[in-house]
Each structure stands twice: as C-alpha cells, then as structure tokens.
Image (spheres, rainbow, N blue to C red):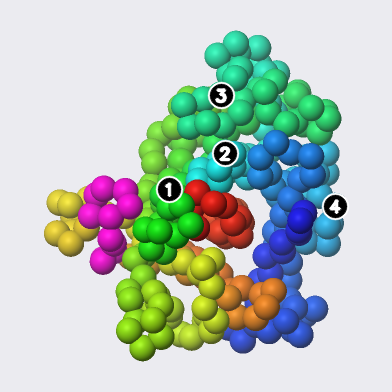
Amino acid sequence: MFPTYVLYLDGSQTTTTRLADATPVLIARKRKKAKCTHYVIGDDGAERSVNETHASYVGKLKANFIGTRFELLDSGSRPRAWGSAATRGFDDAGFMNADDDDDHDDDDDDDGPPRRRLASVRYAVNPLGARGPRTMSVSLFRRRGENGTPQEEDSCVELVSATPKWNPVTKAHVLRFNNGRVTRPSVKNFQLVHRRRASEDSLGVESEGSPVTSGRLVAQFGRVDDDLFTLDFAFPLSPLDAFAACLSAFESKFARE
C-alpha cells in the first residue's frame, strides 16, 4: 500500500536479476498518513527511508484527491514560512497549500528558499476507462535564474502522451516502443511526445486530450517484468521530471481508469 520505487541506471538488457549490479539514481517513497497521494523523492538509492530531513531529499510529488493532477515540487520550504496569506487553502488546480497540506510533522526546513513547482502531470477524466486508454500531459516549468519566486515561471514546455492504436488481432490498444524496450502490456505503459505549435507542424494537435500523431518522442516507459519497468527519456525532461511522470502512472484511480 505504501511502496518504494527506485530508478536505476543500467544498459539495454535490464532484468530483475541484474538490478543488484545497477546503479540507483532516484528513490521515491509513498508517504503514510497523507490526505492524498504523496511521494517523497531522494537521490540516494541506498536510503530507502528517505524523508524531507535527509540530505538526499530532492523533492516531492503530490496529487489531487481523484488522482488526475500531480505536482512535482522541489526541496524548498513551505510557502507559509514566507508569510504569504495568499498561499493558504486550495489553489485553482485543487492542490493543498501551506497550512492546509499534510506537512504537519516539521519535516520541511522553513529556513530555506521557498518551494517551487517543477512540473505538472495531468490525466484526462476517464471513469472506468469508458473513453479508452489513459491520456496524460506533462508541463515542465523553467525559470530564468535561481532567485525566482513560485510566481516567476519564465516558460512552460508541454508534452503529451502518444495515442495508442487499436490492434484487431490482440483486441487491445497498443503503442510501438523503440528497440524492444517494452515487452509486456500494461495500462501504465506510455510514451511522451513534445507538443508542437500548429505553425511548426501541420499535423500537430493543440487541444489537450486530442490524438497526437507526430512530434518528437522524448520518453517511453513500460513493463518488462512483474515488478520491473524500463524508462528512456531525453531533453527537455530531467531525470526527476521523468521519474515523477512514471510515479503518477502507478496510481490507479476510478476517475482515470
């Protein structure tokens, strides 16, 4: 119920038996007693009990109640430490802020810089999968310098999930993964494509949730064993961004299945 996930750096022939020789890069622990899905992420794969007090702590991934929106936050302190009354309560995306979040155990260091949003992962509302496969989109927030406040987002890079095609032989929706890196079907499998403006690509689709037929593939994630998935990603995704997108895929919620 409260799993721990580890991102390993390994070659193209990853198997469960070879993980002992792989290099752990990031680790995420699902937090207990949280009101909504809440992962604490660290960059020391050997530290399985990572929390906000550890030196390896790099950020957290938090979801709304129905599991359709996730926010990746860095390791900064809570907004309430900066005395902003505007940060109290819920924002327009349904995320808890400041005193209304579940960080009541003094895990955060209130003396550091304010917490910043790094990425947002969104899933189209799809009760019991009635509208077909999952549809996800990822927004990556980039800033000009290190001194920006949470409101000073310079740019936003949009990624969208590739649309699976129906296979009449297998009677299932399928994705074509590169180099045989994904070998087992799973509802968690996905590919992310860099969304392009219509002026850049005549086949691009601007509206969220619409089919994506073109663009640059920047990530693919899928099952290769019972408890093992492979992840390939490229710029503009960072390892933390890509890992957060994968963590969101493990959540099974009524509103998006």
Element marked by disc 3: strand
Distance from Cα at disc 4 to Cα at disc 3 = 29 Å
- CA distance for labels 2 and 4: 24 Å
Residue, disc 3: 90
User: What element does badge 4 sit on?
Assistant: loop
- Mark 2 residue crowding within 10 angstroms, few (<14) / some (14–19) / many (20+): some
For label 1, the residue is 125
Mark 2 or mark 4, earlier in chain: 4
Callout 1 touching callout 4 (CB < 8 Å): no
- The answer, for residue 218, to whether it is visible in the render is no
Residue depicted at 79% across the width and 27% down the height: 104
Q: Which mark is residue 64?
A: 2
Q: Which residue is mark 4?
A: 49
Q: Amino acid at mark 2?
A: Asn
Answer with mark 3 or mark 2, whichever residue precedes in sequence: 2
Chain-order first, disc 4 or disc 3: 4
Residue 216 drawn at (x, y percent): 33, 65
Circles 2 and 4: CB atoms closer than 8 Å: no
Question: Over which residues does the magenta segment extend?
Answer: 205-215
Identified at 83% across, 39% down, the residue is 53
Between the residue at mark 1 and the residue at mark 3, the CA separation in whole angstroms equals: 20 Å
Above or below, comparing residue 135 to residue 32 in the picture:
below
Residue 98 position (above or below residue 21): above
Q: Earlier in the sequence, mark 1 or mark 2?
A: 2
Q: Most prominent secondary structure in the magenta stretch?
A: loop
